[in-house]
Amino acid sequence: TYTTLDIQNLLAGGAGNPIGHLATPAASRAPGEDEILGRVTLKYEPTDRLTMTLKASYDRNSVNNSSWNYVAFRCGLGSGISQLSGYACDNDKFVTHQNNMPADIAANFPYAKKDGQLYNRYESYAINGNVNYELDNITISSVTNFNRNNNRWTCACDFQSSNNATWATENSTWRSFSQEVRALTSFDAPINLMVGALYQKTRRNFGQWVAFAGLRNSAASPENQFVATSKTSFTKGETTALFGQVTWKIVPTVELAGGVRYTHETKDSFFTQPYNNPGVTGIFRDQNDPDGLGVVNANQTFNNWSPEVTLTWKPSRELLVYGAFKTAYKSGGFSNGGINSKFSTNPLADLTFDPERARGFEAGIKSTLADNQLRLNLTAFTYKYLDLQVDFFNSPIFAFQTLTADAKTRGIEAEFEYAPRAVAGLNVHGSLNYTKATYTKFPLAPCYAGQTPAQGCAAISAIDSRQNLNGAPLSVAPRWTGNFGVAYDTDLSSTLKLGTNVDVRYSGSYLASGFNNPLSRQSKYATLDAGVRVGAWDDNWVIALIGKNLTNRLYVSGVVDGPSTGSGTGTAAGIPADQLGFANLPRTVQIQLTKRF
């Protein structure tokens, strides 16, 4: 298992021309978000049958650290002290430990800020055109869309300050064009139809550059002197889909709807590591590697049929009962940000992954009671996932991989909303959900870092160990969740109105790791949001004070093993890795002013 420290040890003797650097602390106020967005809509109705709408939108968002929410959630040693840098692992504190890229590295480093400050900048724009033409009993619709986005960042990619620091930059651009056409009938007859087709063309261009502290090649070009390894990749995609639905009103109160979607996809991808410091070519396979595996090309084709059927019974205006069989499909693809590892004999398999499919049943009741004052809904469901996509860093061969497993989720959800006429403006709402989500087939799941044979980790080769996760819970899958809230709106005068709200959200405990790591356990928690707003009676202007997570409760929505922590996986001497968690936002209070023109 190679770590950043191991890579640097391989450079001993000056093979990589090591040099010292000074790294300054990353911004303490994070994420420091700035965002500007805008949208323009044009609508043209030359006749009462034809409507044309054109929308254009732009968004630019930036934060001062792409990994600002990585917190030291749990220490692997159980001592409360990190294995890497000696700081405390606080599972209830909004604290990060990261450094900027040293300025001497950043000066000519691709897509780094010259002063080495960490950042993440996302920019996108989209143009969408809709055309609706209504005949006597048929509506024909066309949707045309063009979208482009660019994401670039600098991160402290060991996510914590250390002498063995790793930094990286990335620049990724995605663009797509799509055209959808559909026709919907509205005959005064028991049977009506919807048919449609979609064509989409996409391309993603990807580049990434990685630096290790103490590593330099003075003979390289200025932009590559401090680059340890770089990646260049792209994926071109083309999708064609045909879909249709038949609705049959069997009797006035019973309706049967059935449909199917056929999807055909092709993806052509390319990946190489064009520059590697001479000291790391034994780890990162160079594009000119003599073994001929330095350039990876993938040509993937996926086909899928996704049917669904729903039976609805509406005995009255206040009650609807339904049952449904549904399927879903998530495309396979290519990992543009993966690694072509010199330790892997099959980089094509490391970088490609299969589609994910789901199928199952749900049934429910939707009701409006108490003379339209109470809305009450109840849903039960069960779904099976085939080839569930699970991301994994295979440390023995130093490669990112997307594995597949089978899983099952089942549960019940209840929600209500009560707006009594006796108290005008009052709204009480809430929900309660029970879900059980487990792997049903994952016999060769990866072991978590430091897992021992006594904890279920078995060696399957000299360099690889696996565990059986059949029946184990999925990540971030609490059994119980719920929310409860109260909102109240009232008139202050003939021109002003006041609104208030209080909302509580609850989650039961869950494992944040996808590999059943007990150190990733997030305990149960509740968060509190509240707000007050004053505005014009017609909402022409509104000023609001909004508070979120007012109890300042930290929870994580996922974890990764701390780089260069943990060891001995699959042996009795295993030491668990530190757990770095993706934390939520702490307490936030904001003032929001809205003006409509």
Image (cartoon, grey):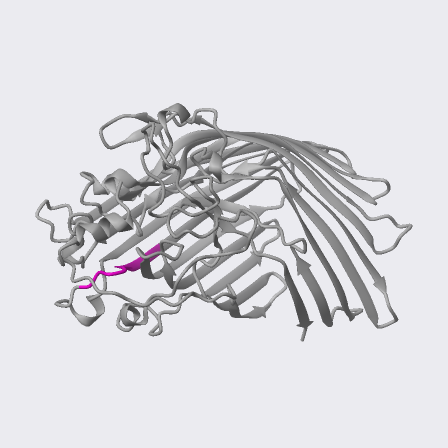
Of 554 and 372, which appears nearest the observer?
554
Of 563 and 35, which appears nearest the observer?
563
Q: Is residue 410 above or below residue 36?
A: above
Q: Is residue 116 above or below residue 405?
A: below
Task: Give me the residue at 36% from left, 44% from top.
Answer: 565
In the rendering, at what x and y percent does residue 128 appear? Answer: 49, 63
Task: Give me the residue at 49% from left, 65% from top.
Answer: 28
Q: Is residue 379 above or below residue 142?
A: above
Q: Report the predominant secondary structure element of the magenta stretch.
A: strand
Q: Is residue 276 left or right of residue 197?
A: left
Give the position of the C terminus as an image quadrant. Answer: bottom right
Q: Is residue 494 left or right of residue 437?
A: right
Q: Is residue 341 magenta?
A: no
Q: Is residue 519 visible?
A: yes
Give the position of the N terminus as an image quadrant. Answer: top left
In the rendering, at what x and y percent does residue 268 appear? Answer: 26, 49
| Total number of numbered discs in the rendering | 0
Q: Is residue 211 magenta?
A: yes
Of 130 and 540, which appears nearest the observer?
540
In the rendering, at what x and y percent does residue 227 appear? Answer: 23, 62
Task: Give me the residue at 69% from left, 51% from top.
Answer: 528
**Quadrant in which residue 410 is drawn:** top right
Q: Is residue 373 left or right of residue 240?
A: right
Q: Is residue 323 visible?
A: no
Q: Is residue 448 left or right of residue 253?
A: left
Task: Give me the residue at 37% from left, 38% from top.
Answer: 355
In the rendering, at what x and y percent does residue 457 appear? Answer: 36, 27
Magenta residues span 202-216
